[in-house]
């Protein structure tokens, strides 16, 4: 008969291996380089947001990793050259987020609310990618609760003021 410890040891070892492989797959520039983000302003419906702009691959890879907090009137905008199915994950995040995917015309294609961070070794091994329902050109990340507080829906519109 297998004891509980005998059953859990292989699972723990597999989780550690998966975690190490996951961490090794992060591009080195996102681990070592301090990425600077330009800032801009957007509106979602009539709600203004100051945003950090992630418009290059190193900036998109780094995202909000390791940032301690995000004020409720700020966010990050991921900008892509062409529409696509762009996924996000919460690796090394410190707080939960709301995420919104927008098409090239500023219409929402997908919303994810209260996505939890992946910061402990066990969470990192099971951290899932979030894939939108449709192709997007922009992704906005904001502090969890933003979507609910501002009543953002599938009918909401992104207006880019300056990025």
Image (spheres, grey):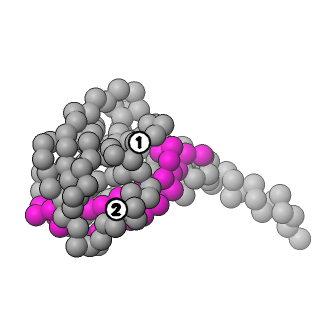
Q: Which residues are magenta?
A: 93-121
Q: Is residue 96 magenta?
A: yes
Out of 3 and 90, give the one closest to the viewer: 90
Q: Earlier in the sequence, mark 1 or mark 2?
A: 1
Give the percent coordinates (x, y) of residue 130: 39, 62
| Residue 61 in sight here | yes
Image quadrant in which you'd find residue 5: bottom right
Q: Is residue 125 left or right of residue 1?
A: left
| Element at label 2 | loop
Q: Is residue 111 magenta?
A: yes
Q: Look at the numbered discs 1 and 2 and tell me whether their residues touch, using CB distance below 8 Å.
A: no
For mark 1, does the 10 Å Cα neighbourhood hold few (<14), some (14 to 19), or many (20 or more) residues?
A: some
Q: Is residue 12 left or right of residue 146?
A: right
Give the percent coordinates (x, y) of residue 21: 50, 46
> At 30% from the left edge and 61% from the top edge, which residue is drawn?
100
Q: Is residue 16 left or right of residue 59?
A: right
For mark 2, does the 10 Å Cα neighbourhood hold few (<14), some (14 to 19), or many (20 or more) residues?
A: few
| Element at label 1 | loop
> At 39% from the left edge and 47% from the top edge, which residue is drawn?
72
Q: Is residue 57 left or right of residue 111?
A: left
Between marks 1 and 2 in the image, the one whose residue lies nearer the viewer: 2
| Residue 21 in sight here | no
Which numbered tag is attached to residue 70? 1
**Residue hosting label 2:** 150
């Amino acid at each position: 008969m297998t004891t509980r410890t005998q059953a859990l040891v292989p699972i723990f070892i597999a989780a550690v291996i998966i975690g190490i492989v996951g961490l090794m797959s992060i591009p080195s520039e996102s681990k070592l380089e301090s990425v600077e983000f330009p800032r801009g302003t957007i509106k979602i419906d009539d709600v203004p947001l100051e945003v950090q702009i992630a418009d290059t691959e190193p900036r998109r890879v780094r995202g909000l990793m390791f940032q301690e907090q995000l004020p409720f009137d700020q966010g990050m905008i991921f900008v892509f050259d062409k529409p696509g199915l762009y996924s996000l994950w919460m690796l090394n995040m410190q707080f939960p987020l709301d995420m919104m995917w927008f098409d090239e015309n500023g219409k929402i294609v997908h919303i994810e609310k209260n996505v939890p961070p992946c910061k402990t070794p066990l969470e990192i091994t099971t951290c899932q990618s979030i894939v939108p329902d449709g192709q997007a050109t922009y992704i906005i990340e904001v502090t969890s609760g933003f979507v609910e507080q501002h009543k953002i829906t599938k009918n909401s519109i992104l207006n880019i003021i300056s990025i």
